[in-house]
Image: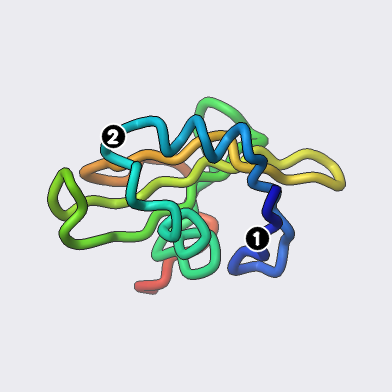
Amino acid sequence: MEVIIDRFGMPIRLTDERLVHILDHPEMADLKDSISGTLKRPELVVKSNSDESARLYYRFYSGTRMGDKFVCVVVKIRPGDAFVLTAYLTDKPKQGVALWNANT
């Protein structure tokens, strides 16, 4: 298990089980470092519309296996605990309340 300190200073757990699940997807296989990079230096953090206790961290990466994409890391936040649920590539961030935007 790895603990990553996010942009806000919050420790986020990345369990071995979740990491294996994420890296099992071929498009994410070589993007392990992008998970911590996205949490530490997000370009956008959005509060999920479908789960009030989830945050979506986004960072744009050029030249992934799928081309230029955002990596989205989904973090579940509970009192006294935060952990990575999943991570995936996407063309654009989902809508939701922006909690952090590096461009503003």
Dot 1 amino acid type: Ile
Task: Specify whether 85 is left or right of 38.
Answer: right
Helix, strand or loop at disc 1?
strand
Which residue shows up at 29% across the image and 51% down it? 70
Q: Which mark is residue 93?
A: none
Task: Specify whether 7 is left or right of 56.
Answer: right
Reply above or below: 87 against 63.
Answer: above
Q: Quadrant of the C terminus?
A: bottom left
Labels 2, 1: front one: 2
Which class describes the residues within 10 Å of circle 2: few (<14), some (14-19), or many (20+)? few
Q: Quadrant of residue 34?
A: bottom left
CA distance for labels 2 and 1: 23 Å
Helix, strand or loop at disc 2?
helix
Reply above or below: 17 against 32.
Answer: above
From the viewer's side, name the closer residue of 5 and 32.
Answer: 32
So how many labels did they put on this image? 2
Residue that badge 2 annotates: 26
Which residue shows up at 34% across the image and 43% down it? 29
Task: Pick out the residue farthest to the right.
Answer: 80
Reply above or below: 6 against 68.
Answer: below
Residue that badge 1 annotates: 4
From the viewer's side, name the closer residue of 43 and 30.
Answer: 30
Image spot of residue 86 (x, y percent): 50, 35
From the viewer's side, name the closer residue of 12 and 15.
Answer: 15
Image spot of residue 13 (x, y percent): 70, 48
Task: Specify whether 61 is left or right of 35.
Answer: left
Image spot of residue 3 (x, y percent): 70, 57
Dot 2 amino acid type: Pro
Colour scheme in the image?
rainbow
Q: Quadrant of residue 93?
A: top left
Mark 2 vs mark 1: which is more N-terminal?
Answer: 1
Which residue shows up at 86% across the image and 47% down it? 80
